[in-house]
Every structure is written in C-alpha cells, then in structure tokens.
Amino acid sequence: MSDTQARDQVRAQISELDRLLIDTIAKRGDLVEEILRAKADEGLPVRDREREQAVLREAVERGKAQGVAPELVESLFQGLFEASIQRQRTHFDSMRDEDLNEATVAYLGGPGSYSHIAAQRVFERRNASVVPAPKRDFISIFRAVESGEVDFGVIPIENTTTGSINEVYDLLLSGNAKIVGEFLLRVDHCLIGRSTGLGRVNRVYGHPQALAQSRRWLASHPEIETHMASSSTRALERLLEDDDTAGVIAGADAAALFGFDILESGVGDHEQNITRFIVLGRGAKNPTREVECKTSMMFTTRDTPGALVDALMGFRNGEVNLVKLESRPIPGNPWEEMFIMDVEGHVEDKVIKDAMAVLEEHTREIKQLGCYASDRIDAVSVAE
C-alpha cells in the first residue's frame, strides 16, 4: 500500500468519526427535548448548574485518562451546554408562540446591516421566519412597534467599545414599547471591497458606529478618507455605485450578501466587540420564571444626601446582581440625573419585589422598561 493510500484510509476513518460525532450531538439534542418537556410539566428552572458542573468534571477526567486536553473537552461541553440552554430558553420565552411561523420585524437599515443579521438570528431560534420591515432611524422602529405596524422591533442599545446608545434609551423612556428580549451579537468589522486589494483603497464608507469602532485601524491608514452612511446597507449600496478604490467597513455576512471581497478582517479596535440588541414589543407579557431573566428600569432619586445608596440597599440586601447602572442627564432639568438599571432576576421574584419596595421609598419616579430572558449564559467551571 502506498503512502497516499494509507493517508486516504486514515482520512476516511476520521471522516466517519466526524459523522458519528455530529449524529451523537443530534441525538443529544433529541434527549434535551425530552428533558424540556418534563421541565415544562413540572415548572422546573431551565438551568441546572450543579448537573452541568458534574457532567463537565466527569468529561474532563475521562478526557485526561485518554490524553485529551482539558481545554478542548471544556470548550466542547460549554458549547453543548449553551446550545441546550438556548434551546430550552426559547421554549419558555415570552416571545414564544406556537402559531408564530413568521414575524414582521422592524430594524435599522436593510440587507447586510448588523441589525438585519441580529433580527434573523433572534427569530431563527424561535423557528420563525422574518418578514423584514427596514427603517431609516430608531424613532421609526419605535413607532412601527407602538402602532402595531410590526410584531417586533430589533434595535441596538449598547456596545462593549462605544457604550450605550442614548437615543434608544430616550425613546424607551418616552414611549410605550417594552423590552421583551435581548440578543448579543459578536461584531467582527472587516474592510470590504473588490479583489484588487487594500493598496488601492483611498476612501471608506460606513455607519458612524462601525467607523467609531475602527478608529485605530483608520488612524493607521491616514491616506483613507472616511464617509459616513445612514446604515451599513447604504454604505454597501454606495460601494456598488463606486469603483475599486472605495471600501466599506461592515461584517463578513454583508460581504457575502452583496458579493464583495474581504480585503482585511479584524479592523475593529477590540477583539471582544459585542453589540447588545433589544427586542421591542407592545403589550408584552413577562417570561415564565423558569428562565434566567433581566429586569430593566429607569428611576430618579430624591434630592437628599445618600439617596442613591439608600435606594439600592434593597438589591444589596437581597443579593441581587446589578448588571448595569448608568446615569443620564434629565432633559430640561440641568444638572439633574436619572439612572438606567438592569438587574438579574424576574420582576415577580420575591427578592426583586422587596428590593423594588426599598427603591420606591427613595425615588421620585420609576419606569419599568421590561422583564425578559437574558441572552448571556455564564459558563460553569470544574473548579467551582
């Protein structure tokens, strides 16, 4: 047998093992569905961290005995846990509707925009297709949701590099739409253009957020002029109208959709660039308490010393985790601040109710922005 034939045989065995691996993961998913039905019947929480930890510890030990690196085993099982939890959360989600085969969704921009990608992925999880209702600006998305023109809106609210989007918070505070879900999208900015290469590019189009999140790369190329576009879609449309000396900063999915080449990937300032999108709804019901939730709110404190500390004491005493606390100026009231807060927990949990009672004692106004299933899944560790 020649060396080539021997390699082909080994590759065939590897391919068979790969198929068995995929088949096994699929069978595991079927068993997750059985557990899901049982949890639904008994009203049990979606997540069992002690079970995850035990499974992970056993898998790592088994891997060590067979010479498999613990990091590889842990990475594989964390991925399986996350897929399983997301699958189960979807079943209990307040957005879940057995009859919802499609949803009309408003989002910023058009095909290829990050908002379009986020909207698609949010509803793919719910086995629903998206009927697109692209909008030119944030206020149009809110109006479409509040008027009943669309079922939902998907809108960015904060980014790990550029922070909160103040306009979205202002619209949440002044409008009637509620947060009914969230989605965390990892953003990988690329320079998109035609295959002649980076050397010819002397101007770049992009949404202001995309350009702002790529400042370092742009600063390292002072020969390139930047041109803002109202959305990533509009930036790509301008590239269609331009020649090969132009480029766009957008995602790889957008490049594939419009038929452009990726001239350089990873042009964003940070590797961990994540945009948090919220899903807007009207007349929203709260999710079931079986899922891990967030509750978002706005409040203004009384004008007394220590009011903020006193207002938050109930959350501390109840060991409620504050995942976001941010001050904002109050329009029309110079030097006065409001606070935006996200906490872990369901609005109907006793500890949240008790903490809210303390909050009310030390505030002038509270507006709940929504209670919804959290998209973040914290990994368990064998060391815990």
Image: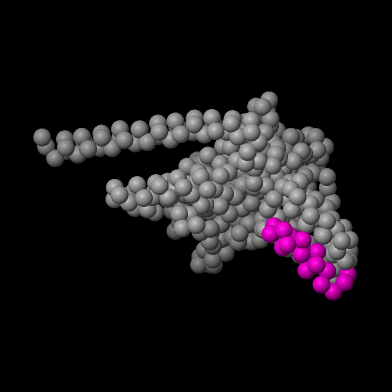
Q: In the rendered view, does 313 fall on the left or right side of 212?
A: right
* Helix, strand or loop: magenta stretch: helix
| Applied colour scheme | one colour
| Residue 296 x %, y % | 74, 52
319 falls in the magenta region: yes
Q: In the rendered view, does 221 fall on the left or right side of 346?
A: left
82 falls in the magenta region: no
User: Could one spot residue 301 in this view of the protein?
Assistant: yes
Residue stretch in magenta = 303-320
Residue depicted at 47% across the width and 42% down the height: 80
Residue depicted at 50% across the width and 57% down the height: 384
| Residue 281 x %, y % | 75, 40
User: Could one spot residue 247 in this view of the protein?
Assistant: no
Q: Nearer the viewer, residue 271 or 308?
A: 308
Residue depicted at 61% across the width and 43% down the height: 118
| Residue 332 x %, y % | 89, 64
